[in-house]
Structures are given as structure tokens and as C-alpha cells.
Amino acid sequence: MPTSADQLEVAHQPEKKRFAILLDENTAVLEYIPAKNYLVFTHTEVPPALEGRGLAGKLARTGLEYAKETDQQVMPLCPYVAMYIRRHPEYKPLVLPGFKV
């Protein structure tokens, strides 16, 4: 069973407006709201049974990479995603102008 975040697959579930990692009957998610030309990241949640494996970071990175690949900006209302961007400044150009992280 993979335990490292690098070994786990993130599924984009646009019908549920989220990115998800399914593991051991638990689901870690990064939820978003699609807007005109940007994504509003609203919530990241990792069940207690999956904490400490780097899943939230993998979800944030995947969501931000998706925004970059689809030429969208982001509004990180989710505190975790905002913190991730502060720690990984290469994603700051994706942040909607005027929005502070």
C-alpha cells in the first residue's frame, strides 16, 4: 500500500468540483468553485486517518498545476492553499490580481 504522497494519484472530479485522493476508504479533497477565468479554492480537508502523509500539499500542488495548465488564475480562499502559495512562490503569478496570500 502506498503511503507517500508522491505515490498517490489525485483524481480531478469536475462534476463534484474537487480534486480527491482516495485511500483506505477515506477521501482527502481540495474543493473549488469555477468562475469565469479563474478557480476559487475554498476548502482542503484530509481525514484524521490520512494526516501526516503530505496529502494536502499534493492536492494544493495538483490544483495549482491544473490552473496553470488551463491558463486560469486562482483565488485561494482556503487558508491551506494560500499558505502553500506563500511557501511556493512560483505559484504567486496565478493569484488573481489584487488578492493577497
Image (tube, helix red, strand yellow):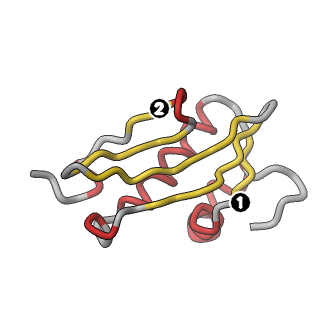
Quarter where residue 99 is shown: bottom right
Residue 71 rendering spot, x and y as whole percentages: 69, 31
Disc 2 residue type (three-letter)? Gln
Local secondary structure at mark 1:
loop
- Mark 2 burial class by Cα count in 10 Å: few <14, some 14-19, many 20+: few
Instruction: Give the residue at x 57% y 70%.
Output: 87
- Mark 1 burial class by Cα count in 10 Å: few <14, some 14-19, many 20+: some
Which numbered marker is on residue 13? 2
Quarter where residue 37 is shown: top right
Residue 36 rendering spot, x and y as whole percentages: 81, 30
> Which one is in front, 88 or 36?
36
Image quarter of the C terminus: bottom right
Which numbered marker is on residue 77? 1
Quarter where residue 51 is shown: bottom left
Q: CA distance from mark 2 to mark 1?
A: 19 Å
Vertical arrangement, residue 95 with respect to residue 57, above or below: above
Furthest-right residue in view?
Answer: 98
Instruction: Give the residue at x 61% y 70%.
Output: 83
Vertical arrangement, residue 74 with respect to residue 15, above or below: below
Local secondary structure at mark 2:
strand
Residue 13 rendering spot, x and y as whole percentages: 47, 32
Q: How many marks?
A: 2
> Which one is in front, 44 or 26?
26
Instruction: Give the residue at x 48% y 45%.
Output: 62
Residue 58 rendering spot, x and y as whole percentages: 41, 54
Which numbered marker is on residue 100? none
Q: Is residue 95 left or right of residue 81?
A: right
